[in-house]
Every structure is written in structure tokens, then in C-alpha cells.
Image (cartoon, rainbow, N blue to C red):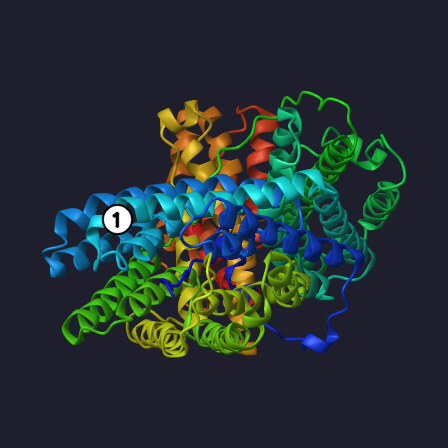
């Protein structure tokens, strides 16, 4: 029996795409509730065929450890071709880089075991850190480069003279598994991810459309938005990786650009709807006489939305087409808020129409039309502290387990060290990885037990490859049925790693009961020690992560509120657009974690759903600011600087005082010169009125009482 393979990860899991990281590995439904579809059976048969093909070729080529190829198939296999394509390249690159680093370090430091351990652990931790902050599919290559060095380097310590041949064999076996999966998926009933992507987009848009129509059809304060935006925000997290997979299934650059644009635009719908809801609530509460005039506006918008899926192209409602041409010259606060609401409704209809048209164009084969709207700078949230803690936990655990192996001369210590490195890297993106690690351990142990039974009961009866294929099919086909479902992916992979690691198929049968049991024990010890060290050095609660994400939002809001410099104004305030993109990126992550909080904390931190809307308003104001006259620009800059200072203090919900906000807005209304361009004047005041709708009612009442005194000063 040779060393055991332990590398496992799937595209679409939280590792490659951290936004969905806490939704994986939860078996809320019993296995008995699983009902395989025709697609599940097709995927299971294709996975089994690819695994047996890789094993057959590995035997024919006399590769030293053919089971690496089989296990790679189980790790790479995906039900859609785009998922396989997106994963294969990064897996090969990561494996090649990790193997090359092992070839470099092991011969150099083999006579200094302590330095070798520190070097290998340091490389693993460094790659893990980069994978966590990368935030793209490329992160898969980083993490593979990290724990591949553990899979090759630690078992080679006892025979460093064979490190090059071992590394080459691992790369060959992994490449064979990747190639087998790719060929089977491309040649036999390939399934594109584009229809799945389109179906998810359509379902999301239908749910958003239904919620919007209900909001426009019911009195303010019904709580419809609060009930739906949580679910819609979480679903957005799943659309991001799916759009990447779908892009691999189309060779057209214009469609890939269209998918990226649709992904950007659809994220702006919820913040825009949040603005509209705030307008309606404030009008109903503070300006009932103006609210009574909204019925035709809301009815026409609602009717337009109801017909938008049936008619294409569809003109905007006539009540919105007129813009603000007929608005009074000096509107009062209620009238200005109605004008702002009308502008927001028009923006919502235009954005909805753009999203619908993009989706329709992506469904056909026609060329994507050119658009004048430039793509906004993209930026994702990166938690360097959490990534650093994860890297430190893996580093310390690998060093401790490796030193225990060295000092005790444990024969299977390399297996325990490998497992600590792999599992620590595998679940590092989670807030609290320990429950997932423990569950991984339970499924891996089950796989090890079944592997031992297969090795000593069934395999002795297999006298040729056909017999071996029949035996393995008893495991591979059921595993494939569950492997294509995200909720069962990690349990199946952990089971497969335990099963294949103990089985350790080679060209000749070499069953050794004591060695197999020792290998299984070493696997469990490595995982168990990783769970303990993770609990000590790394685990954080969802509430801790929510607070960090909330305060990160406030930092970016402070950046957005900061008056734009002349250089930023000339470049369209790209730093502000990047800050807003980060807020948009955090919102699904916050929504996922809010589920784990108490109802009271969930209610309090749900204020984070307001941040994208506030950020959008601040970005609009910063774009309008440079066109003001010098004196007015200075007045607005002072107001924005005061607001930025409030956000820079990073208070938690309920601790933030917006008392100066309303008085500052009133001062700006009085200070803006009438000589300014009327449209510019109106647009700025409308955006400030929209910003005012986000003042909590109790805070607003306090401010109203102080307004006369503040204005007198």
C-alpha cells in the first residue's frame, strides 16, 4: 500500500467562490428525500465511466498509483461542461506548481527536518492566504498549489531521492483524471450551464417583479421588501459563480460581456427598490397630502411591470416619460420628495428593461447590441484578517503534527500531516469550520470502513479489469447520483477520499489489513487535530463576521461621502465606484450570515441592506458636485465631510447619530445659489431628499425639534 491521496474540492463550492461558502455542507434534508432525476442518472453514469477510463489507462501505462486518477475524476466531475472547463485548467496549474515547489524544497532541506517542515507549512499557509483574498475562480489554483506540496512533499521525506519521479507521477495521474473527465463530458451528452443560468436569472427576476408589484399595490409599511430581499440577496450569491460557469460554455466574447453586464445590473435592482420603499414610507408618514396624489403614478408603473415580460420592446409609462419638466420652480419638501420618487421609479423601469433586454439577447444567437453605458469598476470584499487567521491556524497545525510525527517516528505521520493541511485549507473560508470538519471526518471514516471491507472481501474476487469495474461501479454510481447535488457534494467527496485512500488501487493486489487500518487512523488523527487547532486559533461566530462586514460597509460609505478630488472627478470617481461595488459584494455575504443570528440581532443588522442604496445616493451626489459654483461646492463639501466623519467612527446599529444630517440638508437648500443650472440644482436636492429618507423616524423627530435652533446658528 502506498501513500494515501487526499485532495478534494469542487468548483461551485465555497472554496472557489467564497460568497456561497456558508451554504454548502448542510444536510437539512434526509438522504431518503433525494429523488434522482434523469440528469442525475446521466451524470452518475458519465462520472463512473470517466473514473473507470482513467483507471484503465493508468493501469495500461503502468503508473505507480492509479487511484490518484480515479479520485481526481470524482473531485473534478461536474454535471455541466462549463463547470468542468472552469475547474480543469486551475487544477492542473495548481498541481503543477505545488509539485514543482515540492521538488525544489524537499531535496534542499531534507537533512534539516525542522526547516523543511516550516518551509512546507509556510508555503501552504501563503497559498491559502492568497486563495482567500483572491475572490475569483483563480483561487482554486492557489489552494491546489498549497496542499499539493503536502501531498507530495511529506510522503517523500523518507525517500527524497525519488521526489522528482513521485512529483511527475502525481502530475501525470492528476492530468489523466482531468483529461478523462473532460473527454467524457465533451463527447457524451454535454450539458451546457447556460440554460441553468438563464432559468435562475428568470426565476430571480420573476420573484423581484412579484415583490415590486406587491409593494406598489399595498400601503407603505407592509414589510414586503423586508420579507423578500433577504432571500433575493442570498440567491444573488449563487448567480455569481453560475455566470462564470455559463461563460465557459459559450465561445462568444460578446455573450460573455453580456453576462458580466447583466450580473452587474441585476445587483442594482434591490438597492433601487429600497430607495423607492423609503420614499413611499416617508411620504405616507410625513406628507400624507402628497402621498394621496401618487395613485396614478404607482398604478401606471405597476401595470408596466406586469406587462414587461409579455411585450418587447415596451415603452416606459407615459407618466414617467415626461421627466421633471413640469416641476415647480421652488418646490416644498413634500413635492421634492414626489419628484425624487418619480425619478427613482423611472430609473427602476429603465434598469428593469435593460436587464430584461440583456437576458433576451443572451438567450438568442444574435450579436449583443452595443451599449453606451460603460461598465463600472469591479471590486470585491477581501477580509485580510480572516484570511490571515486561517493561514496561521493551518501553519501551526501542520508544524505541530509534523513535529509529533518526527519525534515519535510514527510510520503514518505523513498521512496525518497531509490531512491536517488539506482539511484546514479546504474549509478555511467558513466562519466556524469546526462543525464542517467534524462532519467531514464522520463521512471520511465511513468511507474508510467501506474501503477496508471492499479491499478484503470484494477485491480478492476480482480477477480482471471487468470484475474490478463491476465492484467499483457499486460505489461510483451511487456516489455520482449525489455528487451532482450541491447539498451532498462535500459528504460524498469526504466519503470518496476515505474510500479511495484506504483502497489505494495499484496494478497488483496488495491488501495489508494492519497498514490499511493505520492509514485510516492517521487520516482521522490529522483531521481531529486540525479541528482542535481551528477551534483554538481560528473559529469565529457569525455575529463576529456580521459586525466586521457591517463596519467595512461604513468604511466604504465614508469613502463615498468624502468630497471627490479634482482628479477623481475627472475619472468618474473610480474609487467611489469601487467602494460601492464592495458594498454590493458584501450584501449577499451579510444576508447569508444573518440567518445564524438571533431574531433581535438579525433585525438590528438588517440595516446593512440599506447601505447599497445610501452608497448609490452618495456616488450620485459626488458626480454632480464638480459642476457647482465654487461657493456652493464648498458648502456641499463641508456637509459631505461631516457625513464621512460619522461613517468613519464605525458605530454599530443604534449607536449612530444623524442629528446633523437634516439641519445640514436644510442649510444646503438655503445656500445653493439660484444662479446655478436649474436642472443641476434640482438633481442635487432630490438626491439629498432621498438621503434624508434613510434617517430613522425617532432620530428624525429629534432633528426636527432642533432644526430652528440649528438654522438660527
Of the 4 image quadrants, the one containing the N terminus is: bottom left
The residue lying toward the viewer, choosing from 593 and 472, is 472
Q: Is residue 46 above or below residue 447?
A: above
Q: Which residue is mark 1?
A: 163
The residue lying toward the viewer, choosing from 180 and 530, is 180
Q: Position of residue 285 (x, y in %)?
A: 68, 62
Seen as rendered, the residue at the extreme left is: 112
Tell me the quarter of the picture where residue 647 sits. Answer: bottom left
The residue lying toward the viewer, choosing from 8 and 236, is 8
Q: Position of residue 29 (x, y in %)?
A: 67, 75
Helix, strand or loop under label 1:
helix
Q: Residue at x 58, y 44 (%)?
A: 180
Q: Position of residue 419 (x, y in %)?
A: 36, 66
Going by the image, does 508 lie left or right of 308?
A: left
Q: Residue at x 80, y 49 (%)?
A: 294
Q: Is residue 492 above or below residue 273?
A: below
Q: Is residue 9 above or below residue 560?
A: below
Amino acid at each position: 500500500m502506498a501513500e494515501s491521496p487526499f485532495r478534494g474540492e469542487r468548483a461551485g463550492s465555497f472554496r472557489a467562490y467564497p460568497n456561497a461558502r456558508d451554504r454548502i455542507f448542510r444536510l437539512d434534508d434526509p438522504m431518503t428525500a433525494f429523488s434522482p432525476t434523469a440528469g442525475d442518472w446521466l451524470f452518475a453514469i458519465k462520472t463512473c465511466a470517466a473514473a473507470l477510463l482513467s483507471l484503465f489507462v493508468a493501469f495500461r501505462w503502468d503508473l505507480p498509483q492509479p487511484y490518484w486518477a480515479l479520485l481526481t475524476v470524482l473531485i473534478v466531475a461536474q454535471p455541466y461542461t462549463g463547470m468542468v472547463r472552469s475547474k480543469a485548467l486551475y487544477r492542473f496549474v495548481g498541481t503543477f506548481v505545488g509539485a514543482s515547489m515540492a521538488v525544489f524544497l524537499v531535496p534542499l532541506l531534507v537533512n534539516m527536518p525542522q526547516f523543511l517542515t516550516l518551509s512546507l507549512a509556510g508555503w501552504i499557509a501563503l497559498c491559502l492566504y492568497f486563495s482567500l483574498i483572491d475572490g475569483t475562480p483563480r483561487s482554486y489554483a492557489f489552494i491546489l498549489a498549497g496542499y499539493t506540496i503536502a501531498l507530495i512533499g511529506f510522503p517523500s521525506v523518507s525517500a527524497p531521492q525519488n521526489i522528482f519521479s513521485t512529483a511527475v507521477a502525481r502530475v501525470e495521474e492528476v492530468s489523466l483524471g482531468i483529461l478523462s473527465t473532460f473527454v467524457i463530458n465533451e463527447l457524451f451528452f454535454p450539458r451546457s450551464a447556460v440554460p441553468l443560468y438563464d432559468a435562475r436569472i428568470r426565476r430571480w427576476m420573476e420573484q423581484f417583479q412579484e415583490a415590486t408589484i406587491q409593494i406598489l399595490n399595498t400601503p407603505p409599511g407592509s414589510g414586503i421588501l423586508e420579507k423578500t430581499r433577504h432571500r433575493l440577496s442570498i440567491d444573488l450569491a449563487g448567480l455569481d459563480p453560475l455566470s462564470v460557469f455559463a461563460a465557459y460554455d459559450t465561445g462568444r466574447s460578446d455573450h460573455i460581456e453580456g453576462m458580466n453586464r447583466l450580473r452587474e445590473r441585476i445587483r442594482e435592482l434591490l438597492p433601487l427598490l429600497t430607495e423607492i420603499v423609503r420614499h413611499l414610507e416617508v411620504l405616507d408618514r410625513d406628507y400624507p397630502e402628497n402621498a394621496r396624489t401618487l395613485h396614478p403614478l404607482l398604478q401606471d408603473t405597476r401595470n408596466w411591470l406586469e406587462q414587461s415580460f409579455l411585450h418587447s420592446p415596451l415603452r416606459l409609462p407615459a407618466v414617467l416619460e415626461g421627466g421633471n419638466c413640469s416641476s415647480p420652480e421652488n418646490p416644498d419638501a413634500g413635492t421634492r420628495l414626489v419628484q425624487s420618487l418619480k425619478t427613482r421609479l423611472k430609473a427602476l423601469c429603465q434598469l428593469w428593461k435593460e436587464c430584461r433586454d440583456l437576458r433576451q439577447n443572451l438567450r438568442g444567437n444574435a450579436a449583443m447590441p452595443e451599449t453606451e453605458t460603460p461598465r463600472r469598476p469591479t471590486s470585491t470584499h477581501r477580509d485580510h484578517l480572516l484570511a490571515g487567521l486561517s493561514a496561521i491556524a493551518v501553519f501551526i497545525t501542520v508544524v505541530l503534527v509534523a513535529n509529533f510525527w518526527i519525534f515519535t517516528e510514527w510510520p503514518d505521520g505523513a498521512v496525518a500531516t497531509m490531512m491536517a493541511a488539506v482539511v484546514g485549507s479546504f474549509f478555511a473560508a467558513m466562519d466556524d469550520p469546526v462543525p464542517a470538519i467534524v462532519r467531514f471526518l464522520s463521512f471520511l471514516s465511513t468511507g474508510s470502513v467501506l474501503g477496508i471491507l471492499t479491499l478484503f472481501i470484494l477485491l480478492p474476487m476480482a480477477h480482471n479489469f471487468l470484475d474490478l469495474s463491476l465492484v467499483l461501479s457499486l460505489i461510483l454510481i451511487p456516489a455520482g447520483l449525489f455528487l451532482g447535488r450541491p447539498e451532498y457534494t462535500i459528504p460524498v467527496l469526504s466519503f470518496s477520499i476515505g474510500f479511495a485512500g484506504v483502497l489505494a488501487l495499484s496494478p497488483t493486489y496488495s491488501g495489508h489489513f494492519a497498514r490499511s487500518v493505520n492509514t485510516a487512523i492517521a487520516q482521522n488523527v490529522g483531521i481531529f487535530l486540525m479541528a482542535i487547532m481551528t477551534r483554538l486559533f481560528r473559529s469565529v461566530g457569525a455575529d463576529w463576521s456580521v459586525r466586521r462586514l457591517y463596519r467595512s460597509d461604513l468604511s466604504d460609505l465614508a469613502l463615498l461621502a468624502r468630497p471627490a478630488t479634482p482628479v477623481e472627478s475627472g475619472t468618474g470617481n473610480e474609487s467611489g465606484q469601487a467602494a460601492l461595488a464592495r458594498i454590493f459584494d458584501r450584501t449577499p455575504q451579510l444576508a447569508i450570515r444573518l440567518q445564524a443570528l438571533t431574531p433581535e440581532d438579525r433585525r438590528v443588522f438588517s440595516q446593512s441592506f440599506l447601505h447599497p442604496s445610501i452608497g448609490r445616493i452618495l456616488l450620485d451626489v459626488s458626480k454632480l458636485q464638480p459642476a457647482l459654483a465654487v461657493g456652493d461646492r464648498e458648502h456641499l463639501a463641508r456637509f459631505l465631510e461631516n457625513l464621512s466623519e460619522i461613517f468613519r467612527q464605525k458605530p454599530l446599529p443604534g449607536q449612530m447619530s444623524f442629528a446633523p444630517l437634516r439641519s445640514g440638508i436644510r442649510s444646503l437648500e438655503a445656500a445653493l445659489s439660484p444662479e446655478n443650472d436649474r436642472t443641476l440644482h434640482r438633481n442635487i436636492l432630490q438626491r439629498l431628499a432621498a438621503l434624508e429618507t434613510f434617517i430613522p423616524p425617532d432620530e428624525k423627530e429629534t432633528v426636527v425639534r432642533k432644526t430652528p435652533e440649528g438654522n438660527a446658528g
